[in-house]
């Protein structure tokens, strides 16, 4: 009987060891994917001084180019994270790319499809035409990325707030338009720029505006660009 028990126990213990190793392998793979997502998000934002640690907020929707040259439109940071996660799950996390702060890592590079729009601390919507213009934003206001690394960036470092729609935009010719959502805001800004190619200046938010804080989902009413700037500076 004792021999029989030993014979039965040995395969059972071996099976448990294999299952445990598989679980550890899956956990490691999941952790590596999340690390790749964090590093990609960090690189995207750091290049332009964007997000919670920068001076500007991305205006969605926008499109990105993945390392396989496919283009995907995303309407929020959550959608962006899901897109990156799906890509790394399907294609792995190795490859040429940017270097994150801290340990040197190679990750496939993620690029914007230009032009994109960002909101600055004064409530102006800035159209960014190319990578050089993005770097100029970074030079003008780099933020505090030097104090933070990519680890956990997708969880706590992405944005300070979301605009609550509808909002009103004022264009440089003093005309105004109310927009009901992010897509309409992007479309109206592009439409105005196309119809007014020789007019300088940037569209501005008309205050007061309401924003929803990403940290706790609270709603905050801002009555001036000074209040918006202070909120952004205090956000980190």
Image (tube, grey):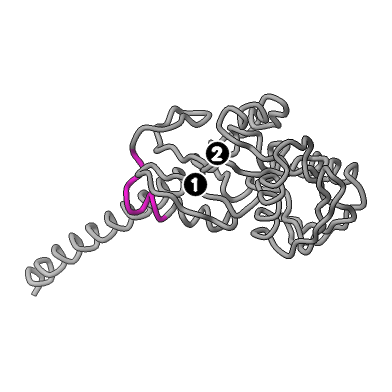
Report helix, strand or loop for mark 1.
Answer: strand
Q: Which sits in the foreground, 108 or 184?
A: 184
Q: Residue furthest right?
A: 223
Q: x, y (%) of residue 143?
A: 71, 31
Q: Which sits in the foreground, 232 or 185?
A: 185
**Cα distance in 3D space between marks 2 and 1:** 10 Å
Residue 72 lies in the magenta-colored region: no
Start-end of magenta stretch: 86-94
- Residue located at (78% from left, 42% from top): 124
- Residue located at (67% from left, 51% from top): 191
Residue bearing the label numbered 2: 44
Q: x, y (%) of residue 47?
A: 58, 32
Answer above or below: position of 152 versus 178: above
| Quarter residue 138 falls in | top right
Left or right, residue 145 beside residue 230: left
Q: x, y (%) of residue 77?
A: 58, 53
How many numbered dots are placed on residues in this image? 2
Considering the image in quadrants, where does the C terminus appear?
A: top right
Answer above or below: position of 81 versus 122: below
Q: Name the main secondary structure of what is drawn in magenta.
A: helix
Q: Which sits in the foreground, 178 or 215?
A: 178
Q: x, y (%) of residue 24?
A: 33, 53
Considering the image in quadrants, where does the N terminus appear?
A: bottom left
Disc 1: CA contacts within 10 A as few (<14), some (14-19) or many (>=20):
some
């Amino acid at each position: 009987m004792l021999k029989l028990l030993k014979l039965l126990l040995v395969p059972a213990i071996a099976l448990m060891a294999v299952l445990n190793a598989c679980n550890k392998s899956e956990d490691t793979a999941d952790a590596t994917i999340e690390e790749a997502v964090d590093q990609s998000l960090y690189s995207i934002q750091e290049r332009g001084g964007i997000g919670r640690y920068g001076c500007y907020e991305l205006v969605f929707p926008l499109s990105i180019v993945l390392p396989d040259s496919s283009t995907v439109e995303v309407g929020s940071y959550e959608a962006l994270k899901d897109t990156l996660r799906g890509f790394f799950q399907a294609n792995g996390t190795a490859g040429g790319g940017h270097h994150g702060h801290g340990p040197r890592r190679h990750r496939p590079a993620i690029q914007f499809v230009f032009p994109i729009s960002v909101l600055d601390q004064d409530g102006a919507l800035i159209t960014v035409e190319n990578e050089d213009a993005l770097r100029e934003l970074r030079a003008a206001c780099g933020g505090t990325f030097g104090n933070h690394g990519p680890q956990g960036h997708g969880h706590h470092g992405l944005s300070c707030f979301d605009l609550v729609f509808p909002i009103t935009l004022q264009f440089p010719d003093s005309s105004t338009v109310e927009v009901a959502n992010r897509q309409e805001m992007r479309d109206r800004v592009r439409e105005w720029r196309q119809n007014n190619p020789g007019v300088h200046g940037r569209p501005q938010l008309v205050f007061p505006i309401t924003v929803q804080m990403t940290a706790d989902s609270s709603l905050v009413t801002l009555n001036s660009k000074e209040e918006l700037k202070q909120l952004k500076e205090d956000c980190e």
